[in-house]
Image: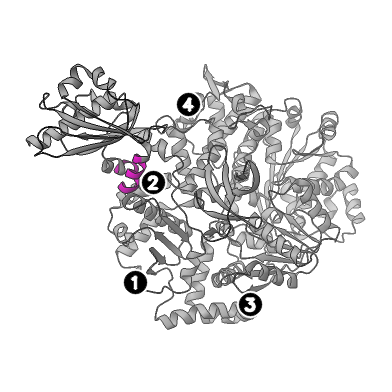
Amino acid sequence: MLDHLDQRLRKLIEEKNWIKLTRVQEMSYEPITNGYNTLIIAPTGYGKTEAAMFPILNRMLKEDVKPVTVIYITPLKALINDLLYRIDWWASRLGFLVNRKHGEVPQKEKNLRLKKIPHIIVTTPEGLEIDLDWASRFREHYKNVKWVIVDEIHELINSKRGTQLSILLERLKHFIGYDFQRIGLSATVSDENKVAQFLFGSSERKMKIIRLNDTRNFEIKINKIDNNFTLWRNAAEKINQLIEKPTLVFTNSRFSTERLHEELEKLGNKEIYVHHSSVSRDLKNLAEGELRNGNAKAVVCTKTLELGIHVGDIKKVIMLRPPTSVSSFLQRLGRSGHIVHGVPKGEIICFYDFDVLESLALYLSAKDGKMEKPFIDDGLDVVAREIVGMVLQNQKMSIEEALSIIRGTYIYRNLESSRLMDLIQYLVKNNIIKIEENYLKLGQGFFKIWRFNRDARSSWGKDFSEFFSLINNDETFALKHNGITVGEIDAVYVYKHVRANDVIRISGKFWKVLRINTHKNTIDVTPANEGEGEIPIWKGENTSKSSLIVDYIRKIIENFNEYYLTMNEIMDKNSKESIIKIFEEYRKLGLKIPSGDIVLVENKEDEWIYTVLIDERISNTLSHILLYLVTKKYTLNASSRSSIYGFSIKGTPVDLFKDIINMDERKIVKIVLRSILRSPLYIATLKEIQPSFGKISKINTKEDKFLIKEALRQTIKRYFSIKRTLEFIKKVREGKIKMIYTENAGLLREAIFAHAQIRPWLSDLNLTIYQALKGGAYTVNELSEILGISAKSLENKLKQLRRNNNKYKVTSFVDVDSRETRWCLYEDFIDIVKSEEYYSSFSPLNNNEIFAVNLKSGDNQVEILFKPFDLINNPEEILRKIPFNNIEEVKIREAIDTSYQFLQKYYHVGKDTIVYLLLNAVAYLQSLKYS
């Protein structure tokens, strides 16, 4: 291959002292030189960037290229500086200008980019979005683009940013009018053809997949620490022993990162840094720089350092608890041994016995070359953003052209015209775009949401720069004490787990939750004296675990002896004892370890626990069904848990899973959909996507059906599996999966308890009741059926809403025909009184009987005698006798005939409705008397 390279390029290779090129660089040369769309798959450290750039630079030296010639796209801004240096080393010496584009580039450099147009630009999907949508001068130079390289495509394909990029590439092709060559660089993936189709889209070029089949060995050690009240201290001490300078210590959440760093500092470590998404760019740069310079002992980080940011030679990787997927496990491990034929070296620190099981499962899966399939996000919120982007770019865009571009992607190749029109009509409804003569144009509402002046925007406004990004910035709630922010918690965690009166620990202090404000994303707190009832925030880090982990845990359970030798090789003493302890306990209990064909059922302290190895999306679906049934039948004070080890439900005296087994499938699906609409996961998804559709006000169930349907669809796809849940229930019904009731479900049951409880999220129950009652009058049971809330909980809530100072005030009256109490909105009460449907409920049978009413307000009360005749013909006279406007309690009885001592009561009545309620009481009391 070297013989085919331009002499100037060969000279630079010699200057690098490279004796030969890597195999992946040799394999990639011919297809890229011949113009094939190429996907290069190889582990970290094999020179994939040069594998793509060498044949391109070689052709650039031979051809008359004009800037911009190459767009190099990477998922992380942090990678841009590394890549700029790496590519510039070759390109600048060959006479080509390389530049970068991202949000933190100094203004001086941005201005220079307009004066000296680069041949190669290194950017992110967001950078390309800005150029196409808004940079009218600079994007003209994109008409010279011949090559687009997408780095770390395995990371992009699993996110909305990847979906965004796939449409951007089609928009770029449409803008240029040329089928540019596409090259993807990827770590090992399970479905390379899907990744290739995703990247190449509508391109008609021939394609080639280059896969380096080298099996990369790695060293791993699984360690188990004591899980007691000094857990974090134990973890820090163990990690301190294992660190080999420099080491990356990966955790599964920002909270765990900060908590571990705090403990490591207490041990006297001064050269340990933190790196996660909430840390400032300056602190990230400091951590990266100290690693590169060899000064850092370790950096405690989340997945922000999983990708290929150059941080020097990492001696070891330590993982605090096992990651949730095989791909993440390999990505983290691969940060050490970052050279060709280098051997990655890592340690896993386990808190629990089941952590050990999962670590072994990850190891075995990686050794077998098994990885998760790509999860491609087909959210219509991305399409909405890109439609608006096209309008920003072109001022106007025909609907046919927009559909053609979007259908050019692999993801939306089958998008129906009717579905796109529904989306467009919803954007028009929200005034984000408008339609004039079949052309899409920008609507006036766009700049009301996406604003240039950050200071002037309202609480729901967005900074204009945020329009170009689909990065989910992990929305947070600010904890406020006397108006001062004392900490932050992830929004999804709040929706799932936190409620008023809970105690949470932030920055070493305990705080009691007073109020949760979802509109301002704030939580009012007050200091708590103790941690009793504390919600352990780090337990909320449990993102869904890969089904491969489930598969391999089953293999371990079913073939324990086969894997015993492997355990001896990679586990410390405590880890081996943990796994043996699991098997030994179930042997003593006389139970088979719950795998895929057995469910152990246990009732413990008002919580029903179902232990079974199961895909987490099935577990999640079942726990949500149970949570819905409990809140409907019993109480809102309910909670559920779900994990790969099973699920649980709290708040029911009976085994509701039996009810599910006997249900019709259509009814189960109906309940699933209702339960998801009440799920914290749905609420989080809805809040994430609604700005893309231009929806900034409260959601209306009638007007926003398109948005609700799309949020529901995305939530189901991400977190649930209706089809596989129905299959699971069917197997239980048919006896293929056995239910075994026991008083002790063993150690794997503890894995379910390690997950924080999920509670029903009724963000504005008052508003929900208001919307359900509007225009009608319902009994508690009827309203319970409509809302899926237990009658007892609902009745208590209605009693709160009838108070006079309530925004959604309700009132009640007796339906004389059915003798049931009906509830309605206070604002609708007069209309209901005058309706034909309830005429008899306000029409006394005898208008001349005398009744007594006792009216109470605070410490004051008055009794008045009246006839129904007076209420009908001279109501003002009665009202003049009432000395207060708001009446807390009303008691009506017959004044003369004491043989019928029926009494009717009403509470929190306004003077403007008292006459009608007196008529209702009389009509009801007379119906009882004369029946």
Q: Which residue is mark 1?
A: 741
- 3D distance between C-alphas at marks 1 and 4: 54 Å
Q: Amino acid at mark 1?
A: Tyr
| Residue 647 highlighted magenta (yes or no) | no
Classified by dominant secondary structure, the portion drawn in magenta counts as helix
Q: Earlier in the sequence, mark 1 or mark 2?
A: 2
The part of the chain drawn in magenta is: 785-799
User: Is disc 4 placed on a helix, strand or loop?
Assistant: helix
Q: Earlier in the sequence, mark 4 or mark 2?
A: 4
Q: Which residue is mark 3?
A: 571
- 3D distance between C-alphas at marks 4 and 3: 59 Å
Q: Which residue is mark 4?
A: 425
- Residue 281 position, x and y percent, is 76, 46
Q: Nearer the viewer, mark 4 or mark 2?
A: 2
In the rendered image, is residue 658 in sight?
yes
Q: Quadrant of residue 806?
A: top left
